[in-house]
Image (cartoon, grey):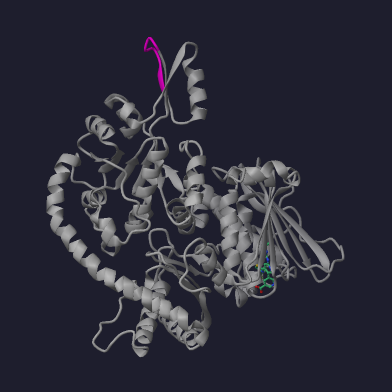
Amino acid sequence: MEKNHYDASDITILEGLEAVRLRPGMYIGSTGPRGLHHILWEIVDNAIDEAANGYADKIDVHLYRDGSVSVEDNGRGVPTDIHPKTKVSGVQVVYTQLHAGGKFDEHNYSFSGGLHGVGASVTNALSKWLKVRVWRDGTTWEMEFHSYYDEKKKKYESGVPVGPLVNTKQRTKRHGTCVHFLPDDAVFSTTEFSLSTIEHRLNELAFLNRGLTITLTDDRITQNEYEAAKGDADSVQLDLMGSMQPFSATYRYDGGISDFVTYLNDGKTRLYAKPLYYKAQKDNIQIEFAIQHTSDFTESLFSFVNNIPTPEGGFHEIGFRGGLTRMLNDYARENKFLKDKDPNFLGDDFREGLTAVLSIKMKNVQFEGQTKTKLGNPEAKSPVESCVVEGLRAIAADPKFRRAFEEIIKKAQGAARVRVAARQAKDTARAKNSIDNFMLIGKLAACSSRKPEQNELFIVEGDSAGGTAKQARVRQFQSILPLRGKPLNVEKKRLDQVLANEEIRTIISALGAGIGNDFNLDKINYHKVIILSDADQDGFHIRCILLTFFFRYMRPLISAGHVYIGMPPLYKVYKQNGSAEEYAYDDKELQEKIEKVGRGYLIQRYKGLGEMSAEQLWQTTLDPARRNLTQVTLEDAVAAEDMISTLMGDRVEGRKEFLAVNANFNKTDAFMEKVKFRKEGDDEEG
Ligand code: 1YM
């Protein structure tokens, strides 16, 4: 391993990589699972850019059993000629210089660099080894880099070339680039790539890059194991091939983001057959959108800037919404859906049941917001707005789409009618609020502190468990709100019906921050809202209903990380004589605790929270020092949307199956897989 740099010109370069080693967080955000995947996205981004520029149409991602990963494209191949300024090969520049500069990043690189875009050299700096193979000019080139501890210098050397770029002289007609690397376990807290994260992102990239074929292979798991994990147990026994073959999948969408919308609306009742799609370039911004309305009542807009999701929205979304409202109001008036004396529809009316994907590409993006996923470029607004107006006009002019626009207007008319009714219901609810506050005195055991940052609201299933929790809590900062029955399933209800439900109103007034568009995160009375339900089907259902409610009507509460799941233990392992007492939260832990307690152990299985004494409930579930809380995050709004409609929506069959599979929810929880959770105190989500 003593073969160091072979060329003097490496020195300055390597100082850059050293900085990356020293402060990985500055370059990739964290050294947790997010950062690990980030270094993969850097490489994938380069391949995507090559495809977006029209030089490649295939990308293969391969996960290996040794923890390494490779990305291959069939583009031009990273340049192999000598870079005039640094006097080393293009390949070496790309993998050893931060933000590969010089002649290489003038034109084509214009659209990359957003959340990612720190460059492939960062991947190299944080890998044990990285191997590049380039097929270009009829031959095959190879170069390898490694990171190691230098005993003499007493420090880490990162991303050092093992040798120069070599022309292997293997003649080939191929062209393209393959990058294979092993993330350094000295850098990352975990080096295990998540198949579901990668699947999801590659699928998304395939939607966003129409016609591009992306394949994913995972040697770590067989096709059968994958299907079994997905719950497709029946097909497993039959498929002999699948028991040997590694998991692999191909993503390709010739309909691009129109296919994306179709996918998002799967299982929903669509108001017109095909999504409406338009693409244009305005003021150096590439804009495309696809929309389709369903019979649902909520809006799902998924926006992207340079292929990066922007769940926090920003100026492009503002432009999109503005354009939609303007064009559709004009259309409604021109076609006499609105009489002269009628007021315009509100934007909300046109967005009821709307599923939309908006994808723009622009230079110099500025990301803002809590998670840096909000577009902060004001200049994006007006081009997007005029593109939407122009696009929808062009589509509406085509007689084929006449019915679609009629349906959209009809839907808006319904929404406007309900809006007026909801306003009245809300006023009633508000008037009733003072009454509710009285009722709450009996129901909500409020804490004494007035500091929302410290305060916790436990929403507890059942009056009896609620009573125990009231005894067990620390009065100063813990509030208890027992829920009587199952709260209303909010998925298919309109706002006015939701507000008419007593349990829901109780939660709204306890939180004190309003609901829907009026929801104001700054006003919340609690920074931890903890759902505490039994470890059985009913409890699981209640939890899902509450999460759906928060997802639909208080989404910022989830995105800001204020919602948690409290995990009561499933078992107590103890000795009759009281010399030992341990709690286990799942079956695996049960085995551990049995071993710990040793001979003569007894097991108590908790069927519900109500079976616990106040003392036990405090020790296991309420005490911040000992409890097991999982934070709910909206890592992935698409997956959440999907799961919530499987659980609660039209697809009743899927829901039954799901509940049956997940009856033991502390152990295998597909919901948890989809709507990602994180443990209290973790630095990031997985
Ligand atoms: C598996 C990862 O990196 N492909 C890739 C990268 C580049 C090119 C082609 C490329 C770009 C340009 C010209 C250009 C890169 N080149 C550079 C740099 N796949 C992967 N495919 N010729 C080839 O942008 O002008 C950085 S990435 F800087 F060297 F041009």
Q: Is residue 23 visible?
A: no
Q: Relative to 295, does residue 247 appear above or below in the rendering?
A: above
Q: How many marks?
A: 0
Q: Relative to 406, does residue 605 appear above or below in the rendering?
A: above
Which quadrant would residue 607 be assigned to in this image? Answer: top left
Most frequent secondary structure within the magenta stretch: loop
- Residue in the image at 40% along x and 82% along y: 382
Residue 304, x across and y down, in percent: 49, 68
- Quadrant holding ligand 1? bottom right
Residue 111, x across and y down, in percent: 55, 73
Which quadrant would residue 206 be assigned to in this image? Answer: bottom right
Which one is nearer the viewer's eye here, 365 or 273? 273
Which one is nearer the viewer's eye here, 10 or 473? 473
Residues rendered magenta in the picture: 576-582
Left or right of 574, for residue 461:
left
- Residue in the image at 18% along x and 58% along y: 429
- Residue in the image at 25% along x and 49% along y: 507
Left or right of 646, for residue 629:
left
Residue 680, x across and y down, in percent: 39, 41
- Residue in the image at 60% along x and 76% along y: 106
Q: Relative to 328, does residue 251 appear above or below in the rendering?
A: above
Residue 468, x across and y down, in percent: 25, 30
Q: Is residue 566 visible?
A: yes
- The N terminus is located in which quarter? top right
Does 266 appear in magenta?
A: no
Left or right of 198, for residue 295:
left
Which one is nearer the viewer's eye here, 308 or 222? 222
